[in-house]
């Protein structure tokens, strides 16, 4: 038994050294498995990011970090599961922005206030959207798309965009687009990104704002035409595709992802996890994952993340009010 434990310890230290981590033993936290709840189904950008982060934290900590997908009710089920757990850092929430900034405004549940009921640990990354049109749409760039929209409006013809759900990041991207240009666009909501994209590919809806990780395969095989990307700078994955900001100065929108613990988790724990997140995001393996999937790294301290959430929540509230988005 002593020999096996010694070998296990040596193997773990060797793995940490290979990853470029310090081999000094961590005191106190964590000394047992950690659960990482993801409030969406398997697959997609949120789940992919969670599994990569969990894998690398497991390697760093020498403790299993187990991903648990608890989907449903626009993320409320998963988030509330974390809120109800002891504030000790052993249950974490890995989520996209919509669950934190939009869901509580749209569903208005008195028992669901993620900004108060969760402790921010770190923002992890952001993911831009690709303005993607059906290839039959006669618009090769944003200016041509706007011209087409205005022509349709003059003729009293509808021109809609597909969205994964009301209040989702891609829906709010479209609303920000409308607000920037004073356009009228019909919103066509679905239950998730895949059916929304499928209907654009089929020509039932002319276009949508899809996360680059979801849109990229469809763009590469010619089922969708990418005419712009919503990040401030062009993506390495689609370098030939201009940003929306190249036509509409200042335009920028994206999904973002972060890590939380239950409210009341001691600062020494959230700060330690945040520091360890910075360590894994500095590794070549994490950088390769980020680049391959179209993410932009965005690591922060708990205090920085808290301030970022406050600003994002205010911006989201303004867009929801502007668009008069309501969940019946």
Image (cartoon, helix red, strand yellow):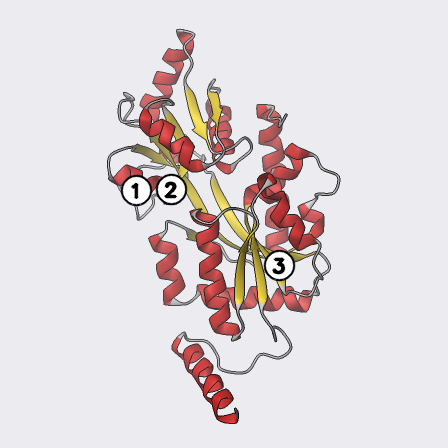
**Disc 2 residue crowd, few under 14, some 14–19, many 20+, Cα 10 Å:** some
Q: Residue 214: which numbered mark, if any?
A: 2
State which mark lies toward you, 3 or 2.
2
Q: Quadrant of the C terminus?
A: top right
Residue that label 3 marks:
302
Task: Count the labels in the image.
Answer: 3
Q: Secondary structure at mark 1?
A: helix
Outermost residue on the front side: it is 1
Q: Is residue 249 visible?
A: yes
201 versus 282 height, above or below: above
Q: Give percent across and percent down for residue 258.
A: 55, 53
Q: Give percent across and percent down for residue 248.
A: 41, 30
Q: Nearer the viewer, residue 69 or 112?
A: 69
Q: CA distance from mark 3 to mark 2?
A: 29 Å
Residue that label 1 marks:
217
Who's the residue at 54% across and 73% down the image? 63
Give the mark nearer the N terminus: 3 vs 1.
1
């Amino acid at each position: 038994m002593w020999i096996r434990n010694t070998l296990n310890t040596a193997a773990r230290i060797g793995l940490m050294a290979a990853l470029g981590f310090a081999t000094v033993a961590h005191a106190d936290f964590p000394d047992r498995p950690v659960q990482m709840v993801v409030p969406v189904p398997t697959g997609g950008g949120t789940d992919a990011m969670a599994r990569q982060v969990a894998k690398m934290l497991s390697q760093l900590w020498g403790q299993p970090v187990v991903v648990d997908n608890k989907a449903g009710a626009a993320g409320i089920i998963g988030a509330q599961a974390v809120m109800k757990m002891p504030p000790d850092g052993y249950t974490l929430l890995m989520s996209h922005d919509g669950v934190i900034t939009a869901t509580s405004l749209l569903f208005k549940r008195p028992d669901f206030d993620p900004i108060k009921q969760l402790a921010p640990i770190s923002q992890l990354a952001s993911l831009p959207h690709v303005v993607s049109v059906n290839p039959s749409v006669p618009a090769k760039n944003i200016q041509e798309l706007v011209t087409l929209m205005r022509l349709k409006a003059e003729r009293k013809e509808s021109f809609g965009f597909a969205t994964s759900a009301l209040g989702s990041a891609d829906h709010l991207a479209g609303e920000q687009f409308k607000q920037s240009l004073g356009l009228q666009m019909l919103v066509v909501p679905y239950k998730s990104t895949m059916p929304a994209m499928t209907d654009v590919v089929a020509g039932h809806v002319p276009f949508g704002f899809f996360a680059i990780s979801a849109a990229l395969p469809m763009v590469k095989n010619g089922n969708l035409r990418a005419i712009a990307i919503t990040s401030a700078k062009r993506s390495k994955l689609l370098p030939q595709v201009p940003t929306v900001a190249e036509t509409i100065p200042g335009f920028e929108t994206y999904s973002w992802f972060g890590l939380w613990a239950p409210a009341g988790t001691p600062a020494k724990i959230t700060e330690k996890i945040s520091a360890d997140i910075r360590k894994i995001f500095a590794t070549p393996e994490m950088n390769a994952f980020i680049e391959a999937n179209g993410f932009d790294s965005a690591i922060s301290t708990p205090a920085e993340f808290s301030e970022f959430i406050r600003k994002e929540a205010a911006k989201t509230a303004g867009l929801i009010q502007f668009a008069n988005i309501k969940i019946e």
